[in-house]
Image (cartoon, rainbow, N blue to C red):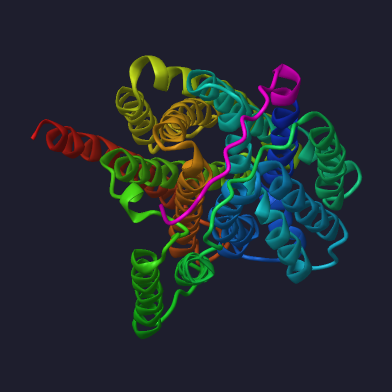
Amino acid sequence: MAASETVISPVRIGRWSIGALGILALSLGTLQSVVEPALPLLQRELDVSPSEGALIGNTLLITGAVVTPVAGKLGDRFGGKRVLVWLMAVVSAGGLLASLAPNLPVLLLGQVLQGVMVGALPLSFILVRKHLPARESQVAIGVVVALFTGGGMAGMLFAGPLAETLSWHWMFALPTILIIATTLVVMWLMPHDPPIRTDHGIDWPGVVLLSGTLLAFMLGLVTVTREGGLPPLAVGAIAVVVIALASGWVAVERRAASPMVDLRMLARPAMRNAFVLTFVITTSSGMVVFLLPQLFGLSADGYGFGADTTDIGLLLLPGAIAGALSDSVGGIAARRFGPRLVVVLGTVVTTATMIALASLHSAEWQLSLAKVLTALAAGVATTALLAGIATAVDAKDTGIATSLLVVTRVIGVALGAQLGAAILDARTDSLTGLPTESAFATGFVVAGLVAALSLIVVRITSKEAHA
């Protein structure tokens, strides 16, 4: 063998340790979600357009897309707990910076640092996978993801009151304090997971090229879809850069003695299908996440509802609860029914809901119900895919496999948000400068059609499996 490994049997963790990881995930979800209900307020306070407003949330996702696979690989190599603690230090610095931000550039910098929180999920999966049997790992992963989503519920609930009674700065300050406290608890309760000893070092060329590819793609995405867009030549140049970096990464990985990502793992049908399905589902979900708060916050003089940040949070709260519940059963559903059936059912629900919402959006309860249904469907489907992959690969590859799937979720949500913003920017009233009602209807239809692509993917992969 080219590499020698020292295998040390890790201690089995109990409910308290899993609970500590879950509470940390809840804290991170809270910090991540405060922007969603407060986006209309932040756009007014900072005097920015919908596309620039989408960038506030997507800046966090850009960092997450770049950092997550690196964090997962380092966690596989050096131990999930050690890398998790270092990431939480960076997240805490970002949260404190955002809480003190006097303007948009500083807020965006804080969001950049906060973005490394996305890497916490695959690191948690590493710890769970190393310390629990495979079947118990699926359930534990579902619990961690559910509490992360539950944090989103808490963020939506408290963002408005904090922003309106104190200031929007406190939306970032309080969750950051909670993250610092829960990180200390995780350090105390969670046993150290043994690192994987190998004769090979880190594949730094692969790390740099993959990070560069993701960064170029995400920055290109938000630049191309912003208000006004880019000339075709500039769009082509961005595409060439992304393709060149991706091609270089593949070439390096194929020759590396110990590649950052084993391309043979990515070539497995289960991995490939999970990536495609996750991307499609989260793109549709990202559109919904962006469009609904925008419609709630529009003036009630027209077709909007004039909701403030607190009202938006309360209206979105049922959807956050549904998302948390769906994530908690996603791992169980994957074990009992298989990810394929879960994805099909979730796609049907999402597509039907979005098509109906295109014509039925005159009452607040209609939008809230749509959020519940789409969050439930997307949460169960993506968590089922994630839990299935986490236990389908070798334990030594858990971090990198799940981190790449998490990155796929991040890219999908970011793309969906920017697509929603681009649709609203493209159809604005010339007198008011606000999006027209038809813009929202178009956005909902597109979100439904994107979700329906999952059925085509499932159909194609089913034929491949029986061929």
For the view shown, which residue lies furthest in the bottom direction? 233
**Residue at the image point whose x is 76% and y is 61% from the top:** 110
Q: Is residue 143 left or right of residue 257?
A: right
Q: Note whether 426 is above or below 351 in the view shown.
A: below
- Which residue is situated farthest in the right direction here? 166
- The x, y position of residue 425, in whole percent, is 49, 63
Residue 329 at what x, y percent from top left?
A: 51, 19
> What residue sits 41% from the left and 18% below the top?
335
Closer to us: 304 or 236:
236
Left-right relation of 81 to 269: right
Q: Which residues lie in the magenta part? A: 1-19
Residue ID at (51%, 68%): 226
Which one is in front, 135 or 77? 77
Is residue 17 part of the magenta span, yes or no? yes
Q: Is residue 60 magenta?
A: no
Q: Residue at x 28, y 49 (%)?
A: 267
Would residue 453 be visible to someone looking at this image? yes
Residue 219 as seen in the image, left or right of residue 52: left
